[in-house]
């Protein structure tokens, strides 16, 4: 494993190398200005004489496809005809596209090389896996953390799910291309990045309560880089190449950490559960789907405020015995989930009910967990305070980067926040601050939603423009 190409400054390079070394699938990361020029040499090193087939959308092919093809030709790498999806109607990571790509790949031994962002990367990863071969990716925007992530976010039978498949064999980030991406895409990546702060608090919480142990080595791959990249918020809105490079590096490191953990826990918590809930409901503004990163951004502010309420309330007045007696039965919990998700497709509702059933614990087990919470609270509180950013500060950073930070900015009503927090808790078994709020009886009313930070319209569109 070699280090990143011409890294764009900062102390993150050793951390990126360490993250790639810990990953299970990704063997090489190239990051720097002009990194596309090294794609041919990278290909030869990893895949020898095997031919390449570029996979892109019409827009992403125009942005970087020709440059990638030239670099491969210069290294003598054979190429099959590129698979270029139409840009309109908007391309989605749909199961039928992935299986069609897999069918096309089975014609020979060519290896797909994705040129694009989230959608193209997910389709290529899964298509390659179904055709039993590796994949590589050249990123066209620092828009999300899935470039190096294990699994693909795919819509099948009407709902989005993460389908198991290996991460790309190599990830290439040409800073010149990344910095020229639409501002809304870079802002979306910053929103995804900001979510790592409350997600880290959720992992601390789960670790302290004995639900899911924290892996310090994996933690150290993500959290220090997050703090460094957050400092570039204002420069990102200007397309500053070093700031975009730092953002992309951190997003890739998050994906590598998820590979090492074989779980999204290092980079995903309650804020992502909210994002997934809103995605399941087709959240849109002006007919445009709200990007993943923008939903995560708003979810991060809401969960940070919920943490502030938890820290302010403390647990001194908590009565574990009484909470255990009042805790809903499994049947009552399943009924509540049916009410909250009554409009969901049958297959999706069945998935939600399965998650609720797995997560549920009886009154005695809840009492024991809350007694443990009281016992560990002094140390846990210090750890949470050291991890979290004040919600108002986080909102300010998001807005400087061009992200929304309040529910109404992405088409949500503040009065629905409490119901959304409970519904989001039900869609995944992962233990987060949403569970602590429910288990301790911490109220989460609409007052969580108001934002005291001076509002500014998010830069660009609500959705990503390059699939």
Image (cartoon, helix red, strand yellow):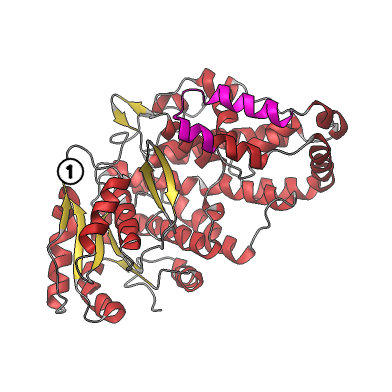
Question: Can see residue 449?
Answer: no
Q: Is residue 221 above or below residue 324?
A: below
In the shown orientation, is residue 420 left or right of residue 59? right
> Residue sitting at 28 percent across and 46 percent down?
96
Where residue 174 appears, as percent x and y from the top left, is 27, 63
The secondary structure making up most of the magenta span is: helix
Find residue 312 and report its image quarter: top right
Question: Can see residue 41?
Answer: yes
In the shown orientation, is residue 79 left or right of residue 452? left
Where residue 214 appears, as percent x and y from the top left, is 66, 58
Is residue 408 a member of the stretch shown in magenta? no
Secondary structure found at label 1? loop
User: Dot 1 surroundings within 10 Å: few (below 14), some, or many (20 or more)?
Assistant: some
Find residue 127 and report its image quarter: bottom left
> Residue sitting at 54 percent across and 27 percent down?
420
How many numbered marks does the figure carry? 1
- What residue occupies the far top of the structure in this picture? 415
As rendered, which of 58 and 185 lies closer to the eye? 58
As rendered, which of 315 and 115 lies closer to the eye? 115
Q: Is residue 420 above or below residue 131?
A: above
Where residue 361 appears, as percent x and y from the top left, is 74, 39
Where residue 259 appears, as percent x and y from the top left, is 49, 63
Q: Is residue 98 above or below residue 420?
A: below
Is residue 334 a member of the stretch shown in magenta? yes
Assign the N terminus to one quadrant of the image. bottom left
Q: Circle 1 sits on which residue?
A: 87
Residue bounds of the magenta highlight: 329-351
């Amino acid at each position: 494993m070699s280090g990143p190409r011409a890294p764009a400054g900062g102390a993150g390079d050793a951390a990126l190398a360490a993250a790639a070394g810990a990953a299970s699938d990704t063997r090489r990361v190239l990051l720097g200005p002009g990194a596309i020029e090294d794609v041919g040499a990278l290909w030869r090193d990893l895949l020898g004489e095997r031919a390449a087939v570029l996979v892109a959308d019409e827009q992403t092919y125009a942005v970087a496809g020709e440059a990638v093809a030239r670099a491969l030709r210069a290294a003598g790498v054979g190429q099959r005809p590129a698979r270029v999806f139409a840009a309109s109607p908007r391309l989605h990571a749909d199961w039928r596209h992935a299986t069609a790509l897999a069918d096309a790949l089975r014609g020979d031994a060519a290896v797909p090389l994705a040129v694009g962002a989230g959608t193209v990367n997910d389709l290529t990863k899964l298509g390659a896996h179904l055709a039993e071969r590796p994949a590589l990716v050249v990123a066209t925007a620092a828009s999300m953390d899935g470039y190096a992530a294990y699994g693909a976010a795919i819509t099948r039978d009407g709902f989005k799910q993460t389908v198991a498949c290996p991460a790309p064999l190599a990830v290439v980030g040409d800073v010149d291309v990344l910095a020229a991406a639409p501002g809304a895409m870079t802002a979306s990546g910053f929103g995804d990045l900001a979510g790592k702060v409350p997600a880290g608090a959720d992992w601390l919480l789960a670790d302290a309560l004995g639900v899911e142990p924290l892996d310090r080595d994996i933690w150290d791959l993500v959290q220090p880089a997050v703090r460094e990249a957050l400092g570039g918020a204002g420069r990102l809105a200007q397309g500053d190449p070093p700031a975009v490079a730092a953002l992309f590096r951190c997003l890739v490191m998050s994906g590598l950490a998820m590979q090492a953990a074989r779980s999204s826990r290092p980079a995903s918590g309650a804020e992502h559960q909210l994002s997934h809930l809103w995605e399941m409901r087709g959240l849109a503004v002006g007919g445009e789907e709200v990007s993943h990163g923008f939903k995560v951004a708003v979810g991060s502010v809401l969960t940070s405020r919920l943490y502030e309420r938890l820290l302010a309330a403390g647990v001194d007045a908590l009565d574990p015995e009484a909470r255990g007696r009042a805790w809903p039965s499994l049947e009552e919990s399943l009924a509540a989930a049916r009410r909250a998700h009554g409009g969901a497709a049958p297959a999706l509702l069945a998935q939600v009910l399965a998650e609720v059933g797995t997560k549920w614990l009886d009154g005695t087990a809840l009492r024991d967990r809350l007694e443990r919470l009281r016992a560990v609270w002094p140390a846990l509180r210090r750890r949470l305070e050291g991890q979290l950013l004040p919600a108002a500060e986080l909102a300010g950073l998001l807005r400087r980067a061009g992200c929304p930070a309040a529910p109404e900015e992405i088409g949500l009503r503040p009065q629905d926040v409490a119901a959304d927090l409970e519904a989001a808790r039900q869609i995944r078994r992962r233990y987060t601050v949403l569970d602590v709020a429910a288990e301790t009886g911490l109220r989460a009313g609409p007052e969580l939603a108001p934002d005291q930070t001076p509002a500014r319209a998010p830069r660009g569109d609500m959705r990503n423009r390059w699939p």
